Image (cartoon, rainbow, N blue to C red):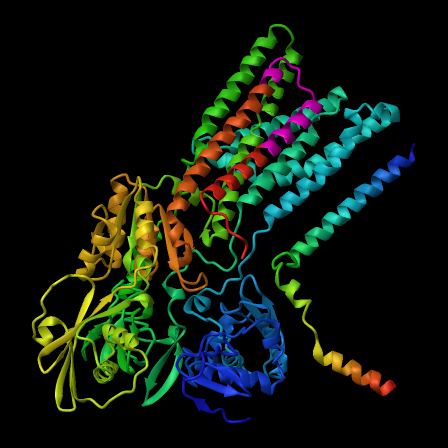
């Protein structure tokens, strides 16, 4: 059953790691604006698409 | 680019391709796309040139009407001033400049898209990043390729003019967001979760299966995890409790801190000296739930500012005349004796003397007077008014910070720090609660000490632990938090949760008239008398067109689109009327004495403008101030069980009409300046009344501040609103009565949930005094009582909101 000692240590370390990640995300301002990114991700970048098309045409 | 043709407004009503407004006055076309004004068309052209028309695909007619935009080339010149730039920017070095603009006009996905694609409009702009909730955009650009002024001009050209005002420049402080509470909550949650894991085997006697080594280990891990909770997460409570005790008062945090100390130290004693498991997981859970309650109560509205003063109303720049040349300088550089130019619609930045031009100053926002004041050459003009009409020249008499208007802010009402109210419901009972708990605890200790001292100590701490008012402390934040959210969805935004408790006590409601009960833009005009021919309508229109008086403007708007005719010998007698000659007939428009004729009935209702040809009255226009639609209904609802007063900066020509409309019970005062309003509110307070003031302008700022609850009414929540406890969208005004009632109900809900948590406490104490409380018992009772209180308050507030018709869909 001694393996439980190791498991406890690992679980505590992992939990602390997540807590640290949360702090980091908070500090970087990830939770300050929870609306704009949801809109931003839906924008298409037309220029890039055109470039891609050109490239694929060339490769053909 | 093809030239648009102007097409007279005979077609079916077109809606502007850019802003979606119906094109009433003119329609301009590009490629069969209609535009309502040249401004909108220009924006479209700019976007089309740069292949940014995707803007119009993301949202339906996303633009902002450009009708009222001004296009003076030099109005951003103050942005060339190094001091101003330095105060506005976030970061700058030799190459780059980062700046955050506040753009209240941001409202849809298209806005975000366009503002984040600014680099396609100008190569010097590196990036734009929008924060939709705060309505800001951070722009980074290369200083060599584009200047700050050019960036602002560019934004203005595409219809997103940033709002830059005096307060941005005077106090550019980086707003630090207080994330402390969230960190505390995160730590408490982390520790609580892990402590639960280590405590569960103990509760189910699994630890014995694992052997004693594990039991000890789990206990010591719990102690290690409890340390951050005790020394970090709970610190806010220690501070608050200590502050209360220092003032010889007891607040809700005192019994909480007692409970926390009892839990922590008794558990340490049990673990280290008795080899038992202690109550540390309960401690973690307690803090976790308490902090959630605190966070829930802390609802803030990002885009709103509740403490704006006159500085956010003032412009940043003024046009100064120096050696016959106009220059635009920042307001801070304006000196006494300077010559300034003020154009139509611009604000008078400082108390000054009129040198040239005809001044019609609209003080509606400052004094509440609806009708502009005419000033003669040589008159002193106070800061804060807006010029209507032709440009005027002034010499500055006082610096902007010492004017008549800004004097209001030196009043003691503004300099006094607001005392945190200690008479809230929770505060009142916590004193009695704490003493009862301590009495029971010591009585228990005394009783047991005759038989079994160790058991007595255990029972003593158990009482303190079990009565730790977790559920009690959560009823207030959750009820108020819910109420705050329900109000917020109904476009009524409170500064904080305490305002609700103050609202519940309100017994006197004071309304400002201009802008609050009335909507200046909604003034109604009716005509009675001999029907007017098209020709005389045209003549009247031409006559009023020459005048800037507000009544003329209203008649003008009422007559609509008519061809103008030539008027000779035009004369305006200020405040009385207009006269002129049309086809050699004398026509007059104005008050009864001015037109000098007879009119049978005299009814005092609104402003009357008579129309006479050759001394004979043809008819009259009745101009009523545009009362908001629901104003009479609101006053009636609010008046039930409360006194209602109306304060107006206006003169009393409408008193009869208003009292007829609102009923005789409403007390009305006219000609009230900002200071008089402030004193009126103070007097009411001395009389022991709990006041709620509803106002909209700077002239109400003093009254809003000195009332118990000051609500600023605004047509757009991002517009300027004076400092207040709450901001209400004008559309929510009709529900004011319901909001006040709901505030009362939420107080009742708090009381009932107090009852609920007292029941839990009583049950707990029953076991605690007998020394029967175990860690498992605590670990179960504490979350159950807290969660049931939360469920109760949430359900109760939502059901009541439904009943009162305050349920709104998220918009």
How many labels sit on residues? Answer: 0
Instruction: State yes or no: residue B778 in magenta.
Output: yes
Percent x, y for residue B407? 28, 61
Q: Is residue B452 left or right of residue B789?
A: right
Quarter of the picture holding the N terminus of chain B: bottom right
- The chief SS type of the magenta part is helix
Q: Is residue B93 visible?
A: no
Percent from the top left, x then y, of residue B779?
A: 68, 27
Q: Is residue B290 magenta?
A: no
Q: Quadrant of residue B765?
A: top right
Q: Is residue A10 left or right of residue B164?
A: right
In the displayed structure, B647 sits above or below B38; it is above
The reply to whether residue B355 is visible in this rendering is yes
* Nearer the observer, B779 or B325: B779
Place of residue B30 in the rendered image (x, y in percent of width and height, measured from the top left):
53, 88
Residue B752 coordinates in the image, percent (x, y): 49, 30
* Quarter of the figure that contains the C terminus of chain B: bottom right
The range drawn in magenta is: B765-788
Q: Nearer the viewer, residue B370 or B134?
A: B370
Comparing B804 with B520, the one in front is B804
Residue in the picture at 54% in, 73% down: B62
- State whether residue B359 is above or below residue B431: below
Farthest residue in the bottom direction? Answer: B2
What residue sits 79% from the left and 31% below the top?
B218
Q: Residue at x 40, y 62 (%)?
A: B715
């Amino acid at each position: 059953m001694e393996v439980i000692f190791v498991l406890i240590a690992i679980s505590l370390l992992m939990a602390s790691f997540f807590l640290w990640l949360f702090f980091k995300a908070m500090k970087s301002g990830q939770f300050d604006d929870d609306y704009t990114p949801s809109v931003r991700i839906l924008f298409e970048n037309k220029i890039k698409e055109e470039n891609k098309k050109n490239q694929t045409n060339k490769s053909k | 680019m093809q030239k648009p043709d102007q097409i007279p407004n005979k077609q079916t009503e077109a809606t502007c391709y850019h802003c979606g407004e119906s094109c009433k006055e003119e329609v301009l076309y590009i490629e069969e796309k209609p535009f309502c004004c040249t401004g909108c068309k220009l924006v479209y052209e700019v976007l089309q040139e740069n292949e940014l028309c995707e803007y119009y695909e993301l949202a339906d007619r996303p633009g902002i009407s450009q009708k009222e935009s001004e296009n003076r080339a030099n109005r951003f010149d103050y942005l060339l001033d190094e001091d101003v730039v330095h105060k506005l920017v976030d970061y700058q070095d030799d190459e780059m400049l980062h700046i955050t603009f506040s753009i209240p006009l941001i409202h849809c996905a298209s806005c975000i898209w366009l503002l984040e694609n600014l680099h396609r409009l100008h190569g010097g702009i590196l990036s734009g990043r929008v924060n939709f909730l705060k309505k800001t955009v951070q722009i980074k650009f290369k200083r060599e390729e584009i200047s700050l002024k050019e960036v602002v001009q560019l934004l203005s050209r595409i219809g997103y003019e940033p709002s830059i005002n005096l307060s941005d420049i005077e106090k550019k402080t980086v707003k630090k967001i207080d994330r402390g509470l969230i960190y505390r909550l995160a730590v408490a949650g982390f520790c609580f979760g892990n402590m639960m894991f280590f405590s569960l085997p103990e509760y189910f006697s699994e630890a014995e299966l694992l052997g004693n080594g594990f039991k000890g280990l789990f206990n010591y891990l719990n102690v290690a995890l409890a340390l951050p909770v005790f020394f970090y997460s709970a610190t806010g409570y220690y501070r608050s409790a200590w502050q209360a005790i220092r003032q010889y008062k007891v607040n809700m945090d005192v019994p909480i801190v007692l409970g926390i100390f009892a839990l922590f130290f008794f558990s340490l004693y049990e673990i280290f000296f008795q080899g038992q498991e202690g109550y540390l997981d309960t401690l973690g859970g307690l803090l976790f739930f308490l902090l959630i309650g605190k966070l829930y109560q802390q609802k803030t509205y990002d885009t709103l500012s509740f403490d704006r003063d006159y500085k956010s109303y003032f412009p940043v720049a003024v046009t100064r005349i120096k050696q016959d040349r106009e220059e635009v300088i920042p307001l801070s550089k304006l000196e006494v004796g300077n010559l300034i130019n003020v154009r139509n619609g611009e604000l008078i930045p400082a108390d000054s003397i009129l040198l040239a031009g005809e001044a019609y100053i609209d003080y509606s926002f400052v004094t509440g007077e609806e009708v502009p004041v005419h000033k003669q050459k040589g008159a002193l003009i106070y800061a804060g008014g807006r010029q209507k009409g032709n440009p005027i020249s002034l010499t500055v008499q006082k610096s902007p910070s010492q004017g008549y208007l800004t004097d209001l802010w030196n009043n003691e009402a503004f300099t006094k720090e607001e005392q945190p109210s200690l008479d809230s419901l929770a505060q009142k009972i916590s004193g009695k609660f704490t003493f009862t708990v301590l009495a029971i605890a010591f009585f228990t200790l005394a009783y047991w000490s005759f038989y079994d001292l160790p058991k007595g100590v255990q029972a003593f701490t158990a009482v303190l632990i079990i009565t730790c008012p977790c559920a009690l402390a959560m009823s207030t934040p959750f009820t108020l938090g819910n109420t705050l959210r329900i109000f917020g969805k109904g476009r009524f935004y409170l500064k904080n949760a305490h305002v609700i408790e103050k609202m519940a006590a309100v017994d006197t409601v004071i309304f400002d008239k201009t802008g609050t009960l009335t909507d200046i833009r909604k003034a109604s005009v009716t005509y009675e008398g001999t029907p007017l021919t098209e020709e005389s309508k045209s003549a009247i229109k031409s006559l009023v067109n020459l005048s800037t008086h507000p009544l003329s403007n209203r008649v003008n708007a009422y007559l609509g689109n008519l061809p103008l005719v030539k008027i000779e010998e035009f004369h305006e007698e200020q405040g009385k009327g207009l006269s002129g000659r049309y086809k050699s007939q004398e026509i007059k428009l104005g008050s009864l004495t001015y037109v000098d004729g007879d009119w049978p009935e005299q009814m005092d209702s609104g402003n009357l403008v008579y129309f006479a040809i050759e001394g004979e009255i043809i008819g009259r226009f009745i101009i009523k101030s545009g009362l908001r639609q629901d104003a009479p209904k609101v006053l009636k609802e609010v008046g039930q069980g409360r006194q209602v007063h109306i304060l107006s900066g206006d003169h009393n020509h409408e008193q009869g009409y208003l009292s007829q409309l609102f009923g005789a019970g409403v007390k009305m005062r006219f000609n009230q300046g900002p200071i008089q309003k402030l004193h009126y509110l103070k007097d009411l307070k001395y009389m022991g009344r709990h006041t709620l003031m509803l106002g909209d302008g700077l002239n109400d700022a003093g009254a809003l501040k000195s009332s118990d609850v000051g609500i600023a009414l605004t047509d757009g929540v991002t517009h300027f609103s004076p400092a207040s406890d709450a901001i209400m969208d004008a559309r929510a005004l009709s529900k004011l009565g319901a909001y006040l009632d709901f505030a009362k109900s939420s107080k009742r809900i708090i009381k009932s949930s107090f009852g609920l948590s007292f029941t839990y406490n009583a049950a707990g104490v029953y076991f605690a005094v007998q020394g029967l409380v175990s860690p498992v018992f605590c670990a179960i009772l504490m979350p159950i009582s807290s969660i049931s209180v939360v469920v109760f308050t949430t359900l109760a507030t939502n059901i009541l909101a439904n009943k009162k018709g305050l349920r709104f869909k998220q918009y």
